[in-house]
Image: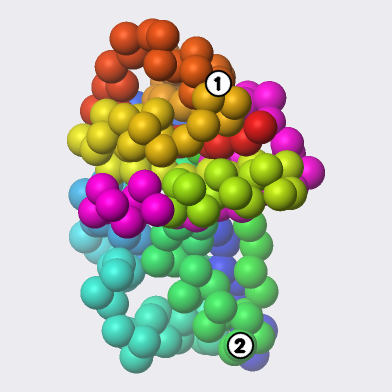
Amino acid sequence: MKKGKLYLIPATLGDTDSEQVLPAFNLQLLQSIDIYVVEELKTARRFLRKCGYRKDFDSETTFFQLNEHTSGSEISAFLEPALAGKDLGLMSEAGTPAVADPGSALVRLAHSKGIQVVPLAGPSSIILALMASGFNGQQFTFHGYLPVKPHERAQKLKEIEREIFKTGSTHIFIETPYRNRQMLESILNSCSGGISLCMAINLTLPDEAIITKTVSEWKQTDFQPPKSPAVFLLSH
């Protein structure tokens, strides 16, 4: 029997019109899939409806929930429909699935079972921020989240700074929105004035803000970062 495919379906980064950031191919494909692996059911259903999904969620659509608490045996069971010939869609809470996202475990397992993985085009906050930063796009590292404890975070920032001066690479990380201010303060207190920081906030949304300055220049501003999704980039 021919196996189904695992489609990696990007979602909007916020309450953006889906037609603005997603290809028409994606929106058409969504209509043909009735099994989805998602992080949060409510968010996934809202996204699908926004994209014009017409099937009934209770009788025609199956959802599997995949988050940091999902066990390996559960993840394996999610792929059983694909082994039986059905296509699956994997969606993240926002942006690109399987990047800083628990969906990567499903993708890895799909490869091990010989299931074709099909990544679809769509918004990635990490890549959009890198594009707009003006920093080195040839060599970069994505760290995910930095340590929460102030001392450990400062230590990590110092380590990143040393790597920047050594290699010239760009370093990218994200933070929980309510800690954006603490992260900015940590960067300004830990990094030398010649390091450049870009903050990319609410990407693809009407109030999008992308600001690149040196640490010295940032210190001369009174910028108060909002409690909104942001990407931080450091370079030289």
First in sequence: mark 1 vs mark 2: 2
Visible in this render: residue 45? no
Identify which amino acid the numbered label 1 is placed on: Thr
Identify which amino acid the numbered label 2 is placed on: Ser
Q: Nearer the viewer, residue 199 or 22?
A: 199
| Image height of 223 relative to 4, above or below | above
| Image height of 223 relative to 13, above or below | above
The percent position of residue 176, horizontal first and vertical second, equals 28, 43
Label 1, on which residue?
A: 214
The percent position of residue 234, horizontal first and vertical second, equals 56, 36
Label 2, on which residue?
A: 112
Q: Nearer the viewer, mark 1 or mark 2?
A: 1
**Residue bounds of the magenta highlight:** 126-155
Residue lying at 74% horizontally and 49% vertically, measured from the top left: 167
Q: Is residue 113 left or right of residue 220?
A: right
CA separation in Å, label 1 and label 2: 45 Å
